[in-house]
Amino acid sequence: MAIAKRKLAEPVRIDLKKEDTVKVITGRDKGKEGRVLSVDREAGRVLVEHVSMIKRHTKPNPGKQIKGGIAERESAIQVSNVMVVCPNCHKAVRVAHHIDNIAGGKTRRTRVCRKCGQTLDRK
């Protein structure tokens, strides 16, 4: 019996970056806030600190100094289930993009809060 391969989601532009603070807007962890630990752009999933905790059963491996037991760790959640938290207005907001002209005729695209206009990118 063949195992069905999982179909990858359509690639969607993800406006999240590592170290962003996000709020979960749906699911069993609705309302929780946390820091983004990693972003998987192909699968459309993010790993958020202290959100979607699962228990992982591990065997002891003395060769690698791994102690066995039940460890809790984060599980990835769908990127559509989280929103960025604005550092200025402290609310979950949608992201806009502003294009800034810098010296030398170059342009830079920055992420901006749609509610207050504060930039979400750290300098």
Image (cartoon, rainbow, N blue to C red):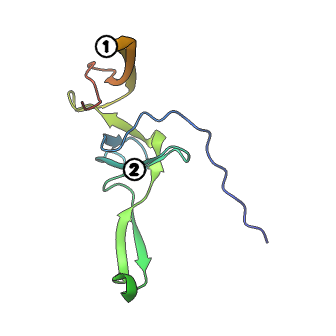
Which of the two discs, 1 and 2, labels the residue nearer the N terminus?
2
Residue at 26% over, 19% down: 116
Q: Position of residue 61 (x, y in %)?
A: 40, 86
Circle 1 or circle 2, nearest the eye:
1
Residue 80 versus residue 65 in the image, above or below: above
Seen as rendered, the residue at the extreme right is 1
Q: Position of residue 28 (x, y in %)?
A: 41, 53
Q: Image quadrant for the C terminus?
A: top left
Can you tell which mark lies on residue 78? none
Residue at 31% over, 24% down: 113
Seen as rendered, the residue at the extreme left is 88
**Relative depth, front residue between 6 and 93:** 6
Residue at 21% over, 27% down: 89
Can you tell which mark lies on residue 103? 1
Q: Image quadrant for the N terminus?
A: bottom right
**Relative depth, front residue between 28 and 74:** 74
Q: Position of residue 7 (x, y in %)?
A: 67, 51
Amino acid type, label 2? Ser
Residue at 37% over, 78% down: 70
Res 102 seen here = no
Res 110 seen here = yes
Q: Position of residue 26 (x, y in %)?
A: 42, 44
Residue 111, by quadrant, is top left
Q: Secondary structure at mark 2?
A: strand
Residues at marks 1 and 2, CA–CA distance in whole angstroms: 32 Å
In the rendered image, which residue does mark 2 sit on?
38
Amino acid type, label 1? Ala
Q: Secondary structure at mark 1?
A: helix
